[in-house]
Image (tube, helix red, strand yellow):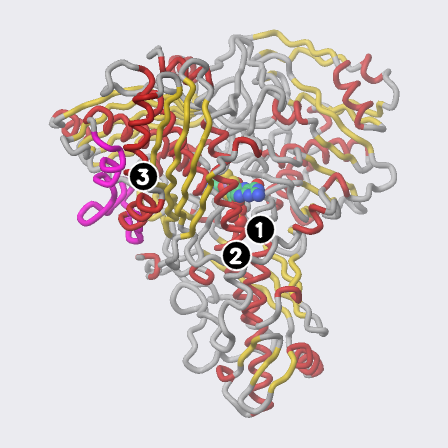
Amino acid sequence: MSAARPPEGAHTAAEGEGIPSIAARPPEGARTAAEGTGIPANPGAPPRAAMGQSHPHESARAQVAGAAHYIDDLPELKGTLYAAPIVSTVAHGRLDGVDASAAMALPGVRAVVLAVDVPGDKMLAAPERDEPVFAIDSVQFVGQVIGLVVAGSVQQARRAARAVKLDITALPAILSVPDALAADSHVLPPVSLRRGDAARGLAQAQHRLSGRLEVGGQEHFYLEGQIAYALPLEQRQWCIHSSTQHPGQVQHWVAQALGLERHAVHVQCRRLGGGFGGKETQAGHLAVWAAVAAHRLGCPVKLRLARDEDFIITGKRHPFCYQYDVGFDDTGRITGLRLQMAANCGFSADLSGPVADRALFHCDNAYYLSDVELTSYRCKTHTQSHTAFRGFGGPQGVIVIETILGDIARALGQDAQDVRLRNLYGEGRSVTHYQMPVQDNILPALLPQLERQARYRQRRQEIAHWNARSPVLKRGIALTPVKFGISFTATLFNQAGALVHVYTDGSVQVNHGGTEMGQGLHTKVAQIVADELGLPLHRVQVTASDTSKIPNASATAASSGTDLNGRAAQIAARQVRDNLAAYLSALDGCAAHDIRFEDGQVRTPRQQRRFDAVVQAAYAQRIQLWSDGFYRTPGIHYDKATLTGQPFFYFAYGAACSEVVLDTLTGESRVLKVDILHDVGRSINPAIDIGQIEGGFVQGMGWLTTEQLQWDGQGRLTTHAPSTYKIPTTGDIPAHFRVELWPEANRADTVGGSKAVGEPPLMLAISVFEALRNAVAAGRGTDAHAPVALNAPATAENLLRALSGQ
Ligand code: MTE
Ligand code: HPA
Ligand code: MOS
């Protein structure tokens, strides 16, 4: 992969790093971090004593025992007060006044905190500066936070918040993508990306199809809702406990709202009860609100949203509307594509720019698009500001090309698997529409393997026979691939830091810039450090994310947590090991590279010692037993103006084969069988990776089947609780659910040859949507070659509509 060769002028990880106080010369012949793209495998230890093993998640036992602490479990400081949000009841309007007198008269109420109480910048430090901390003179969606009530208990605060009277003059609201497009309402300017000549590709095509598709958003439904606990300390110093994927951004936002320098704000998070992208920026809002209230009252304030409030206030996955015109030949190969993607961004930009960019980068999915013209609209509507959600726009790019290919196959009367295979990247067709070479493509081997494992062809025949004899129930099967680009598209975020501390008893503490949200990052980082030092895993402890330990850390997002922080921690551990090796090589008169760290022992050609004994002796010789580590992804770059370059370090691949059954009278459906073959490179922890694949798949299935966000004509989200918003339950998990890992290591230089796993599997669930469309085609009894007009999510209502061709 070209990533192995850093671009001119790029320097690699170790360059410019502080030299440890007693610097060890790297062992003769060993490559250092300054060469190549990373650091070499531990030369002295058997690689992967801990890595590659299915160790349980570091918190698994504590979590099932109820002993793992989330923010709301932390012991509260004396004098802590509780806040509840006052929210707009109007989608768009002029805020003429807030009457808090009735609320203030209620028991326990201590203050009503409004925009005037923000001591620093009244605008949030969001990139586009388009969101006020609290609404100032206008409101832009139902649920916008106008202020907080602070009281002696959560219940008192919530009751009083409902007693606040708002004087709002309603203005016309834009509530849908078509309305936003008609009104030229955008949070960011439209972006286009083209390659070749789409007009010619379409004009000369043997066949053409055009269509529209709507794909709904998705509520994150993290089990732990959004929460922040703000503690004013002495001398204008602050501590913020935040359930956030991005402590550094919480620090930034709180400092700006309080008018402080960032060094005055210390943010901590031991774990999140799920984030899924929903706590990448949205956690910052809560932290700022709690901090402003704590500032006003001079005491600790905790803000925990009720589930309904969380639904109503926070952004979701972007809903998308598409319009396309595609040309293809007799074999189903695409010869020209014109595609318009319009994202419903809600009232502010938030992360919509990079989300919509990632949709552009993924609307090829696994396929070569020779002549393509893409336009991306970032529509402003008067709804919640939509945000990161697992896949970050990628799923919204992948789904449209998969539905197009499904309809092409139908139009030609061919097996969709053949059409997909013919469109894959391959010889002479290996550069993406954004000019990145696809050099690690394993799909031409992976897809046929899954096809065999899942008996796709035979089952397709069997299903056709079964459907012919089943007038009401219809089955469908589909096999779809995923190719997902790994790296933050904003190149600067692809950096990470870590600290490795070895204590004199030989136990190890690691801290890194990532956050643990259930995905197993801390477990993997501990495995990496354990192998680097040749220690059993239990000797390594990862501690809470903390802005005072690792500064300026990126969000834990883009699936890059392990690639970035794992590598930084590996570099830090390696430096401590080198210090110890240098000390022992002098002592035993041997080369440092002849020293092996394994099984908790350190072996030189002369002697074997316990790791803790070496550490104690080295400490007595004043050897540095701790180190930092810093890593930046090499070789990535992209031009924001033209959206071309190499935004990704590598691609993660996978494919799923799903079979569904549809009741054509009621529209009800079930997923019957799922077979997955997914590429995580050389797995650091197979159990955790398989858990991510299963969880990602099921979450994607929810997005495309039962999870429906419904806003009414006034812009009120009517599905704001589990009673009306249906995430998958255990009963929805198919009885046959097989996940296998592709056996090959990453060809890019990552920790142990592993690949990112957090987001890509979500898109495997597009196979369920395609299988449902195939079931609809079997059940509608009209022209078998016509496209299936099914919008996502495939609820019973939408399936019935598609069946009746409405
Ligand atoms: N898994 C769990 N259990 N909980 C989560 O919140 N978030 C997902 C994914 N898997 C998430 C998860 C998202 S959106 C991302 S980007 C990655 O985890 C982030 O973690 P990683 O980079 O360490 O994989
Ligand atoms: N993925 C996830 N989160 C992000 C990204 C990305 O590419 N860019 C900025 N935040
Ligand atoms: Mo994940 S959407 O990148 O937090």
Circle nearer the N terminus (2, 3): 3
Q: Which residue is mark 3?
A: 456
Measure the C-alpha gap from mark 3 to mark 1.
33 Å
Reading the image, the residue beneath label 2 is 685
In this rendering, would 321 be left or right of 609?
left
How packed is label 1: few (under 14 Cα within 10 Å), some, or many (20 or more)? many
Q: Residue at x 42, y 38 (%)?
A: 674
Whether residues under marks 2 and 1 lie with C-beta atoms below 8 angstroms apart, the answer is yes
Report if the beta carbon of the residue with label 3 is closer than 8 angstroms to ligand 1: no
**CA–CA distance between discs 2 and 1?**
9 Å
Q: Position of residue 157 (x, y in %)?
A: 79, 24
Query: Mark 3 near mark 1, Cβ–Cβ under 8 Å?
Result: no
Q: Which residues are magenta?
A: 414-443
Secondary structure type for disc 3: helix
Q: Quadrant of residue 328?
A: top left
Q: Earlier in the sequence, mark 2 or mark 1?
A: 1
Foreground mark, 2 or 3, reads 3
- Amino acid type at circle 3 is Tyr
Residue at far front of view? 469
Magenta highlight on residue 421: yes
Task: Report crowding for label 3: few under 14, some 14 to 19, many 20 or more residues within 10 A (C-alpha).
Answer: many
Taking the image as shown, residue 196 lies to the left or right of residue 453, namely left
User: Residue 35's spot in the image, x, y percent?
Assistant: 40, 69
The one of 580 and 740 positioned closer to us in this rendering:
740
Q: Label 2's element? A: loop
Tell me the residue at 40%/20% (across/down). 473
Instruction: State the CA–CA distance, disc 2 to disc 3.
Output: 29 Å
The disc placed on residue 520 is 1
Q: Quadrant of the C terminus?
A: top left
Judge depth for marks 3 and 1 and give the one in front.
3
Q: Alpha-carbon neighbours of circle 2 within 10 Å: few (<14), some, or many (≥20)?
A: many
- Nearest the viewer among 164 and 131 is 164
